[in-house]
Image (spheres, rainbow, N blue to C red):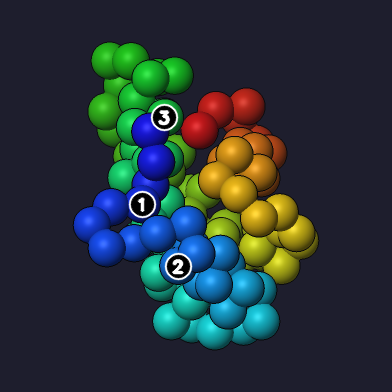
Amino acid sequence: MSPLTGSQSLGDMLRWLKEARAGSGQGLKRVHAACRERLLASAAEELPGDPSGVEALVTETLAKLPDLLSNFEGACEQELRDTARVGSGSGGV
């Protein structure tokens, strides 16, 4: 499953990641939006039957996104997911 939908492409995501790492608020918003649905789906798989726990975990992880991106040097979805997983502190997402 990919977080990219519609007219978004891998190139778009990589550009937004670069912009977010450089401090762009707009780049960060785009990365956030692209990742939110994917993180929700991943968390729901790992925490079945706990919708409030899923939402809380994703919200907490996305709140850490600026700090996570400041240390993130990857360039693909899996590397970003792995960074989010570590940042969530739960082993999930």
Q: Which residue is mark 1?
A: 4
- Residue 31: x and y in percent read 46, 63
Q: Is residue 91 visible?
A: yes
Q: Is residue 53 visible?
A: no
Q: Which residue is mark 2?
A: 12
Comparing labels 1 and 3, the label whose residue is closer to the camera = 1
**Mark 2 → mark 1, Cα distance in angstroms:** 9 Å
Dot label at residue 43:
3
- Residue 53: x and y in percent read 37, 30
Which is nearer the N-term, disc 2 or disc 3?
A: 2
Secondary structure beneath dot 3 equals: helix
Comparing labels 2 and 3, the label whose residue is closer to the camera = 2
Amino acid type, label 3: Ala
Which is nearer the N-term, disc 2 or disc 1?
A: 1
**Mark 2 → mark 3, Cα distance in angstroms:** 24 Å
Asked whether disc 2 touches disc 1, contact meaning CB atoms under 8 Å apart, the reply is: yes
Which is nearer the N-term, disc 1 or disc 3?
A: 1
- Residue 18: x and y in percent read 62, 73
Which of 72 and 1 lies nearest the eye of the viewer?
A: 1
**Mark 1 → mark 3, Cα distance in angstroms:** 17 Å
Image quarter of residue 45: top left
